[in-house]
Amino acid sequence: MAWLRNLSKFSNIKSSQRPNKVDPFLLLPSFTFFSHFSSQPIEEKPYVKPVEHSTGLEPTKPHEKPRVVVLGSGWAGCRLMKGLDPHIYDIVCVSPRNHMVFTPLLASTCVGTLEFRSVAEPIGRIQPAISREPGSYFFLANCTAIDEHNHMVQCETVTDGEQTIDPWKFTVSYDKLVIALGSHPATFGIQGVNEHAIFLREVHHAQEIRRKLLLNLMLSDVPGIPEEEKQRLLHCVVVGGGPTGVEFSGELSDFIMKDVRQRYTHVKDYIRVTLIEANEILSSFDDRLRLYATKQLTKSGVRLVRGIVKDVKAQKIILNDGTEVPYGLLVWSTGVGPSPIIQSLDLPKAPGGRIGVDEWLRVPSVQDVFSIGDCSGFVESTGRPTLPALAQVAERQGKYLANMLNKIGKAGAGHANSGKEIELGDPFVYKHLGSMATIGRYKALVDLRQSKEGKGIALAGVLSFFIWRSAYITRVVSWRNRFYVFINWITTLVFGRDISRL
């Protein structure tokens, strides 16, 4: 059989005759199935672990489009990528998630008011060039180091703990680098927070909260559960009285009043919500609005406790006065701080540990590196205060920097080390547009003052709730997700919240 002899010869080709070109991002096993047709046995070779570091994206050539590398996929990074001109730049995004989270509506997903996909916007929809252009990419990876002298970023792929996949390390060369890595939940060094509390910053956090809440509701209904254990399982504790903590407490109280009391009648009298804050809740809002929020939350059954958490155990937290508070669900929302990767970077720092930037959002003394969002702050030499870690700050910075980089690219200075003499235009100026927060029971707060000491419109009540919903549904990135959000709101109003534990 001629075809069998030819196939046997093919299987015995020497390795030196095979091409040496290897895709650095895809290691495939050798095709040893041809050995079944060979007349001679092939010796099994031991598995050799691939080299940890591999060549990645090489520096761009003068005739090629310059490359902008964006680290992060939050508000700042995604607004920047949306505004960049793909005809001028190749755009590369490195992030451990392939979507942007619309954080103002994240609390609503924890109790089934909205579905999770309604608040997640894929990167490819925000900037289609990343999916279509040959020189633009999205890499599901973490940045591990930055070599600013060689214009190179070191990365490691995200595997979500899969034991069968080894993290792959690679490098990405850049012409312009934008660091938009966001921030990290502030734990203030309190032991047990990372192990036992759940943060509310990502979609998987909301999923974990929802699963834990529904699990505790179902476990508490099992016969034989002691009364004390039932009270602990159904005690939801929220630490942090900022907008996130207050909005989650309001959503949770609505869920209890409208859904739990109807569908878990056996345990409806046991479930409680406690909000712990060291000072005043919603400290950045107008005094009248804070007082209104306090009264409404209390009416909704939320217990407000002023105290400082000293220690966090598996089933209880300990306050600074020694009070022990048992819990079944603990949500931690006490602000943010610099992430470990930001702290490890050898770059100029602003007060508070953020990456220092000048008035044009450039990192001083480092060529072609910019920083925006929660991870950046003005250096002391600018005389400007550090801006708050808000979505509107990050979004405005992303829009400003995108326009500036487009201007640099059009001037022919997009490549590395070529923009020293370019006129950048007006520096970045932030103007606060106001703050909003929902507090449950179809009520919300709208504070349109430009600063805490300034004067402006301050509204509370049902009208503010419709203003809050109208404002945020228009800020959702795509029409697709706006449709999802609107339909979810209507479905919840008519049929109630989805309490399936998936």
Image (tube, helix red, strand yellow):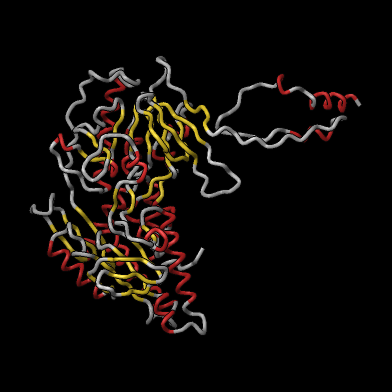
Residue at the spot x=25%, y=72% of the render? 321
- Judge whether 160 appears above or below 247 on screen: above
- Foreground of the two, 285 or 158: 158
Residue 135 in the image: state x and y as whole percent: 46, 26
Residue at (41, 35) in percent of width and height: 93
Q: Nearer the viewer, residue 254 or 17?
A: 17
Give the image quarter of residue 468. bottom left
How many circles with numbers are drawn on the protein?
A: 0
Quadrant location of the N terminus in the rendered image: top right
Identify the residue at horizontal 33%, vertical 53% (top origin): 185
Residue 441 shows in the view: no
Q: Is residue 135 above or below residue 441?
A: above
Residue plotted at (34% across, 69% down)? 317
- Give residue 462's position: percent from left, percent from top: 22, 65
Q: Position of residue 265 (x, y in %)?
A: 43, 81
Work out whether residue 345 can be spotted. yes
Q: Quadrant of residue 50?
A: top right
Return the residue found at the far top: 63
Residue 254 position (above or below residue 21) = below
Residue 476 at what x, y percent from top left?
33, 48
The extreme right residue here reads 1
Q: Is residue 479 left or right of residue 156?
A: left
Eyeballing the image, is 343 above or below 227? Answer: above
Instruction: Name the image quarter holding residue 110.
Output: bottom left
